Structure formats: C-alpha cells, structure tokens
C-alpha cells in the first residue's frame, strides 16, 4: 500500500505545471519532475544523483552573481530550515538564461530532522505573450527565422511608432544597440554552425528576459536592437547592464565545452527631431565606444 501511495505522489508531481526537484542534505538531486525537464531542457537521467550546482541550473541574480557559490537559497534553507522565495535566472541546457520564480521548502522526517529540501520553480517570462507575438510576426513575415526574434523591418516599424509617440505625447523610449564581441572569431575558429548557435543563444536570452512592452530583435548579421518603452536614463542604463550580464552568463554548448558570449552595447534615449536613422546612428556610435573601451561594456549617451 505504501509503495502504491509513493507512485501516486510521483504521478501527481510529474503532472504539475511547476517544476519540482528534491535534494538531500548535500544538495544532491534525488527527484526531478517533467516540468523541470520542460523548463530547463535537462532530462531527469542527466541530473538525478548530481549536485544542483554541478553545471546544471547555475542560478544568478540580476547582478550576475552566482547563487550556487554565494547566497544559494537551497543551501540557506538546508542550514536554517526556513522556507524562501526569490526571483533568479537559471541556466537552460541550451545555454541561454531564463527568469524563474523559485520557492524552497525544507523536508523533514517524522522526528522533525531536516533530511533535504524541495525547490519549486516556474517560468517567469510570459510564454503565451511570446507565443502570440511570434505568431503575428510570422504572419507579417517579420520574423528572423534563425533567432526567432523580430527582424529589421519590424524593428524599423516599431521604432517609427515610438518616435511618433514621443513627438505627440512626450513619452520617451530608449534604444539599445548590441554587437556580438569577436563574432568573426567564433565563425573562423568553430565554423558557421557554431556561429548560428551563438546567434540563437543570444536571441533566446533576449526573448525570454524582455519586458512585454519592450521589443528586441535582430538588426542584421551579429547586430541586435532593443527598443525600450517609457524609460528614463537611469532605467535604460539598468536594463542595458542587466542585458549585458545575462548574455555574459549564458553559454553556447560545443561538445564538452561551454563557450562564453559577450556583447558591446550602446544606449540612447529619443531626442527632439530624431529619425530612425539618427537614433540608430547615435546608439551605434555609442556601441563602438564600448568596443574601444574593451568590449563587454555598456555606453550611454
């Protein structure tokens, strides 16, 4: 009877929409449900028996600080027995970063002894909104098929609308112009297939971590553009630096290697008299300032 009850619980957990995994006191994963597989890309057979910090989820916060080594919510709960909730960015198996809301609860035996912890997490990006946006872009033939981001035609249309909004209602939007650092080196060293993986990983990080009313797309080649609505200089700088960190802490898988990708970013707010050309040119110039300053940087102006 007890065995039957155990399997009923397993079936229930496997059919939850939220991801669930259990760890023992040494943070070794003992159980990994189907939602955890779906959200992270890691199958149960790849992670059960391994430490959660062993190149699996590798949670970071908005500052890019590794929570597996510092301030790990699971480790803290295993130490003091208190539940915790927080928002973090996990490492997807494909390399990109994904925002998740996590809840950690201690596990105790009948005597009250702490025997492990359970972490429940859910995708914090609005997947349905992304889904409908992709559908619309496909219908309008304005989707970059490689990265699944809006293409240049759609970005120009959106930027034109934001300029008109600024001229009429004084609602300020900002631009983030991004260029992948050493992209030619990726292609020359590893081949164009790996270069495509770099573009797709960066695109996935931008897609899953943008606000619903902002728009990130592929401008062309290794250049990407973000249009950030209703923002001031401080807010644009915060979003630019967060984007820099999330891309820096993403990884592109190549056999046994995890390759790091960085970008240089230029950020600017709309100004009186701006056109699409003048705004993009200004952001592009600032991006090159980031390149000259050593790359993997954000320049604002």
Image (cartoon, rainbow, N blue to C red):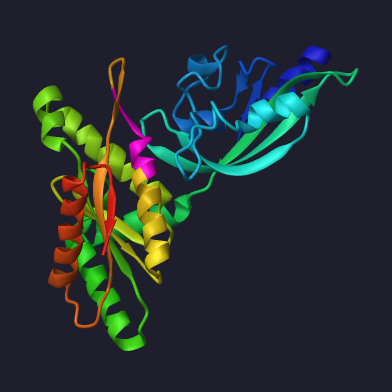
Task: State the residue in front, 231 or 150.
Answer: 231
Residue extending furthest toward the front: 293
Above or below, 182 relative to 153 = above
Quadrant housing the N terminus? top right
Task: State the residue in front, 278 or 94.
Answer: 278
Query: In the image, is 120 to the left or to the right of 237?
Result: right
Quadrant housing the C terminus? bottom left
Q: Can residue 236 be found in the magenta stretch?
A: no
Q: Residue at x 17, y 33 (%)?
A: 195
Query: In the image, is 56 to the left or to the right of 279?
Result: right
Q: Residue at x 77, y 16 (%)?
A: 4
Q: Residue at x 27, y 39 (%)?
A: 262
Q: How many marks?
A: 0
**Bounds of the magenta segment:** 245-253
Q: How far across and down, in percent of the image, does residue 46 sit?
A: 48, 16
Residue 14, by quadrant, is top right
Q: Can residue 246 be found in the magenta stretch?
A: yes
Q: Residue at x 37, y 59 (%)?
A: 237
Q: Is residue 27 visible?
A: yes
Above or below, 153 relative to 54 = below
Q: How far across and down, in percent of the image, does residue 220 sit?
A: 14, 51
Residue 92, by quadrant, is top left
Q: Is residue 192 visible?
A: no
Query: In the image, is 51 to the left or to the right of 185?
Result: right
Q: How far across and down, in percent of the image, does residue 263 sit?
A: 25, 43
């Amino acid at each position: 009877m007890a065995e039957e009850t155990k399997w009923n619980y397993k079936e229930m957990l496997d059919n939850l929409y939220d991801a669930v995994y259990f760890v023992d006191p040494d943070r070794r994963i003992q159980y990994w449900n189907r939602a955890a597989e779906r959200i992270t890309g890691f199958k149960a057979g790849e992670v059960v028996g391994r430490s959660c910090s062993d190149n699996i989820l590798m949670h970071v916060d908005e500052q890019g600080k590794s929570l597996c080594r510092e301030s790990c919510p699971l480790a803290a709960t295993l130490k003091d027995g208190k539940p915790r909730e927080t928002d973090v960015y996990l490492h997807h198996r494909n390399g990109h970063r994904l925002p998740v809301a996590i809840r950690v609860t201690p596990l105790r035996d009948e005597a009250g002894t702490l025997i492990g912890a359970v972490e429940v997490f859910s995708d914090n990006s609005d997947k349905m909104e992304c889904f409908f946006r992709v559908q619309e872009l496909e219908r309008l033939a304005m989707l970059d098929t490689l990265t699944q981001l809006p293409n240049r035609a759609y970005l120009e249309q959106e930027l034109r609308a934001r300029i008109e909004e600024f001229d009429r209602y004084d609602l300020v939007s900002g631009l983030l112009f991004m260029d992948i650092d050493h992209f030619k080196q990726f292609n020359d060293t590893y081949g164009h297939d790996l270069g495509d993986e770099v573009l797709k990983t960066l695109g996935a990080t931008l897609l899953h971590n943008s606000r619903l009313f902002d728009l990130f797309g592929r401008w062309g080649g290794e250049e990407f553009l973000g249009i950030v609505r209703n923002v001031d200089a401080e807010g644009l700088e915060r979003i630019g630096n967060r984007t820099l960190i999330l891309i820096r802490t993403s990884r592109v898988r190549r056999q046994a290697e995890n390759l790091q990708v960085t970008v240089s970013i230029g950020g600017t707010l709309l100004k009186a008299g701006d056109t699409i050309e003048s705004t993009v040119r200004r952001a592009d110039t600032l991006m090159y300032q980031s390149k000259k300053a050593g790359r993997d940087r954000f320049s604002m102006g």
